[in-house]
Amino acid sequence: MAKQEAKQGAEQKIIALYIGSLSKGGAERVIINLADYFQHEGYRVLLLTARVDKEEYRVPEGVIRLITEPKEKELAGGRVSNFAARFRKLRNIWKREQPDIVLSFIGKNNMMAILTAFGLKIPVVISVRGEPLEEYYSRWMRLMAKSLFCLADGVVLQTKRCYSFFPKAVRKKAVTLRNPVRDAFFRERFEGERDKTIAAVGRVDENKNQELLLRAFAKIAGDFPEYRLIIYGEGRKWKEMQQLAGQLGLGERVLWPGNVDNVEELIYKSRVFVLSSNTEGMPNTLIEAMLLGLTVISTDCPCGGPAELISHGVNGLLTPVGDVDKMEEALRAVLSDRQRADKLGREAAKLQTLYKSEAVYKSWERYLLQVMQR
């Protein structure tokens, strides 16, 4: 409260955070964490989304939520006129609110932020949250990203591998900043008898590739009959993956709790955590599992986030994307050698020193202030 009053007593800065929605995903969680931090630090925080979803993260108290999508009657035209309506709505918000800086997340939002703020003397920082080739999936989008991002005042990338996608003009202004993580994940590693569970957390969809994990688990299930697989999250392929589990003969060996709010408590004593994605930026769920000291296995997916977190054989295991046999091999290795598994988990927990909340949040704040001052 004292910080808020101090900033308001001076000239209170306005930070606008812009993303498509607040549906439960990694990028959305990061932007909510940032909104909460900046609000508590005394900034006036605007949180802009195109829409309101059914399953969303809670907007922190004091943060102002604005919807950028025009009303339905304003979108009655064709593609060009609908784009013009969205453009006007967002640009009018910038004119009315006069933020000191805009921080945009993901895909087309980044392009829209740059275009709508152009000429208004409002600095724009864009953040690419995933593999650029996936986030900008068409030839046209890739061309636009590489050219438009030269006009951004700042660029936040997830990993060093992302840099190679962009031209030199973008790379020169780019930085990598760590994802803020909730304090609930910073705790002593559990050293007792662990639950005989393999945990996975994330949307159940094509990219997270839970099918890979299910097929690998099916190969070892007979040799480790006491173990269960628990997949937290929901998504387009939720029912399909449940059916696949049945077809693989896993039956009650796989549990599907859906979306949960206290995942840190639920996975804390798990024997193994697995990320089976085809692509990732810097995966929050993997960071969180490592902070808790879990034994982690991850696919070595583009754009290199897991490989920046995991030193293979030291604090976790990496497997090739889509390789069921290698995933089976990794699972078998850690389940059959608990001493090795615990050693990997203890090394993983050392990541806490890099992700201390205060240092991570301050790095975002310093960077945005530097861009404002420029």
Image: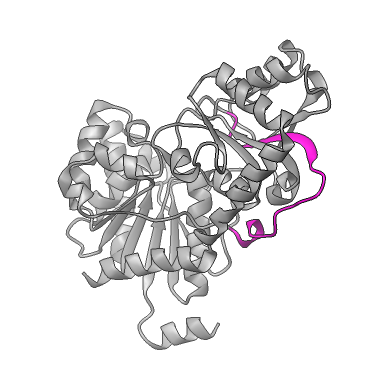
Percent of width and height locating residue 75: 37, 38
Q: Measuring 24% from the left and 27% from the top, which residue is drawn there?
A: 139
Q: Measuring 48% from the left and 61% from the top, which residue is drawn there?
A: 34
Percent of width and height locating residue 230: 73, 33
Name the residue nearer the viewer: 322 or 361: 322
Report whether residue 202 is seen. Answer: no
- Name the quarter where the C terminus is drawn: bottom left
Residue 1 in the figure: left or right of residue 148: right
Q: Measuring 67% from the left and 38% from the top, which residue is drawn there?
A: 340
Check the image and report above or below for 221 versus 82.
above
Check the image and report above or below for 225 versus 111.
above
The verdict on residue 309 being magenta is no
- Name the quarter where the N terminus is drawn: bottom right
Check the image and report above or below for 79 versus 102.
above
Check the image and report above or below for 369 versus 277.
below
Residue 229 in the figure: left or right of residue 91: right
Residue 304 in the figure: left or right of residue 138: right
- Scheme of colours in the image: one colour
What range of the chain is rendered magenta? 182-204
Percent of width and height locating residue 23: 55, 44
Q: Measuring 31% from the left and 38% from the top, which residue is drawn there?
A: 82
Name the residue nearer the viewer: 293 or 67: 293
The verdict on residue 192 being magenta is yes
Q: Quadrant of residue 161?
A: top left
Percent of width and height locating residue 70: 39, 47
